[in-house]
Amino acid sequence: MAFGNSGLPSFLTTKLDAAIGWARKYSIFQYPFVTACCGMEYMATACSHYDVDRFGAGLPRFSPRQADVLFVVGTVSHKIAPVLRRIYDQMCDPKWVVAFGVCTCTGGFYDNYATVMGIDTILPVDVYIPGCPPRPETVLDGLIKLQEKIQHQRQEIA
Amino acid sequence: MSSTPPSSPLDKLGAVSQSELLPEVLTLLESQFSGKVLSVCVNLGDWEASVAKGSVPEIMRFLRDDKRTDFKMLADLSAVDGLKMGLVPRFYVVYHLYSIKLKHRLRVKTNVSEEDPAVPSLVDVWPIANWFEREVWDMFGIRFTGHPDLKRILMYEGFQGHPLRKDYPVNYRQPLIGPRN
């Protein structure tokens, strides 16, 4: 290390990490993968009354290539699972996944031939938002938890 | 009047024959197709007819075209697996008909055995039967002879078995990706 043991490099990288984290957590571009009734609560959260734009997540992108956070909203069946996985693979790093509603968290009350028992069986999940469907306050709480996670993680700069 | 055979599995479903009160549609059906219409009844206020499997298209065509019945709409087509009810033969296919002009409804049932799960297709009578029959094939494994494109409609290609059959294990899953959970 050119800086020796002065502590300067670690000081710089942590400050840089914090600055990038701050920037990233307030410019979340979501990709809403909406398959079921939870979509109504997602829309309620996005609209002006709860206003997800207050948290810097107001612009959903309908292309996975432009999105940072994959919101999986609603029941995922085995038939749609390869599509969901493909959309996740199309997103650029850094990327995060939010499981919205119990169906995406665990399969919910479904226990049958058609339903994936939690999307974490097919892709990594960062934040789980329980509820059937979750109230908008719960969604915003989950979003704030995601922001905390983004802020405090090590920032990969590719 | 009522010719319900005592061994008919449909009797176990609480069907009550009320020969004096039969509506004109059912008496007409019985007189037109004696021997092919196995039984008619009014079940909890709904008109019901049980017919022989082979003559389903013929009877349906009559029900659609006759001025007195005028069932222009096939409202639903489904099936029941009577495995756990002890039905013999095991399945029956249910057709729900509706007349838009006369505003009356009719339920038509036909028995299907497990050894030969095939029913004549009604795509020529009502085109909507196409997707209904594909769904019944997908879920129950009942074939519809004469269907132009009988393939699965809800489950994916390569799915094994028919999930609404009562002997399909309730927790059995066939994921395309991911672990078997």
Image (cartoon, coloured by chain):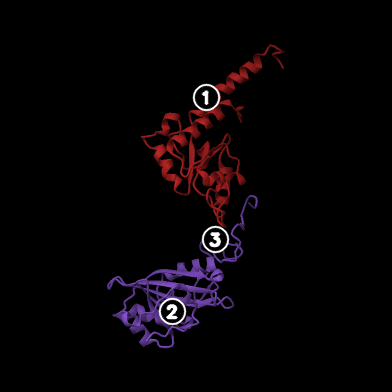
Q: Amino acid at mark 3?
A: Met
- The quarter in which the N terminus of chain B is drawn is bottom left
Q: Nearer the viewer, residue B143 or A61?
A: B143
| Earlier sequence position, callout 3 versus callout 2 | 2
How far from the left and from the top, in percent, is residue A71?
Answer: 50, 41
Is B86 rendered above or below residue A14? below
Which amino acid does the dot numbered 2 rest on?
A: Ser
Colour displayed for chain A in the image of the structure: red
Mark 3 to mark 2: distance in Å? 30 Å
Q: Position of residue B179 (x, y in %)?
A: 65, 50
Residue A51 can be seen, yes or no:
yes
Q: Residues within 10 Å of mark 2 (few under 14, many from 20)?
A: many
- What amino acid type should be assigned to the residue bearing mark 1? Trp
From the viewer's perspective, is the residue at label 3 or at label 2 nearer? 2
User: Mark 1 — residue?
Assistant: A22
Q: Residues within 10 Å of mark 3 (few under 14, many from 20)?
A: some
> Which percent across, then down, holds residue A136?
43, 37
Give the SS element for disc 3: loop
Most distant residue in the top direction? A6
Badge 2 marks a residue whose secondary structure is: strand
Q: Residue at x 48, y 75 (%)?
A: B12
